[in-house]
Amino acid sequence: MTKSRKMRRAFTQEFKAEAVRLWEERRAAGAAIGRVARELGLRPKQLREWAGQAAAEATAPSRGGETAEQELRRLRREVVRLKQEAEFAKKAAAFFARESQ
């Protein structure tokens, strides 16, 4: 005796992205995720997971494993360091200019 199994459906990335976009659009108008999922023939949990993945990809590392916030902090620290180096170079130039006279 064999059990009949439901075939697992596969969805393209385009379908997932469109489903998430539709839900976000409808959510702004007050529609529940369950309603949108039923209209698309999905489970609400499935649509919620896709939305979470889309949100995670939106904040995915922008370079070398950094999130946008981490990159901004790194760049701000670099600006401070470069300003300090420029200030030091000015003082050193002024010191050596006085010494050479």
Image: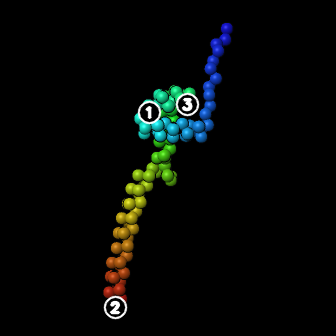
Residue occupying image coordinates x 36% and y 81%: 93
Query: Helix or strand or loop: what does disc 2 sit on?
Result: loop
User: Quarter of the image holding residue 9?
Assistant: top right
Task: Establish if 88 lies above or below 48.
Answer: below
Nearest the viewer among 60 and 101 is 60
Which residue does the numbered mark 3 point to in the structure image? 40
In the image, residue 25 above or below residue 67: above
Secondary structure type for disc 3: helix
Residue count near mark 3 (Cα–Cα under 10 Å), binned few <14, some 14–19, many ≥20? few
Query: In this orientation, which residue lies closer to the viewer: 72 or 86?
Result: 72
Q: CA distance from mark 2 to mark 1?
A: 79 Å
* Left or right of residue 36, residue 72 in this image: left
Residue at the image point whose x is 33% and y is 82% from the top:
94
For disc 1, the marked residue is: 31
Lower position in the chain sequence, tag 3 or tag 1: 1
Query: Is residue 45 visible to the viewer in this orientation of the structure?
Result: no
The answer to the question of whether label 3 and label 1 lie on touching residues, with beta carbons closer than 8 A, is no
Select label 3 or label 2 by which is in front. Answer: 3
User: Mark 2 — residue?
Assistant: 101
Residue sitting farthest toward the front = 29
Q: What amino acid is labelled 1 in the image?
A: Ala
Q: Name which residue type carries label 3.
A: Leu
Quadrant in the rendering for residue 98 = bottom left
Residue 71, position as x, y percentages in the image: 43, 55
Does 14 sit left or right of 29 as displayed?
Answer: right
Residue found at x 55% / y 40%: 17
Sequence-wise first label, 2 or 1: 1
Q: Residue at x 34, y 73 (%)?
A: 87
The image quadrant where one finds the N terminus is top right
Q: Amino acid at mark 2?
A: Gln
Crowding at label 1, few (<14), some or many (≥20) Cα neighbours within 10 Å? few
Residue 50, percent across and down? 51, 35
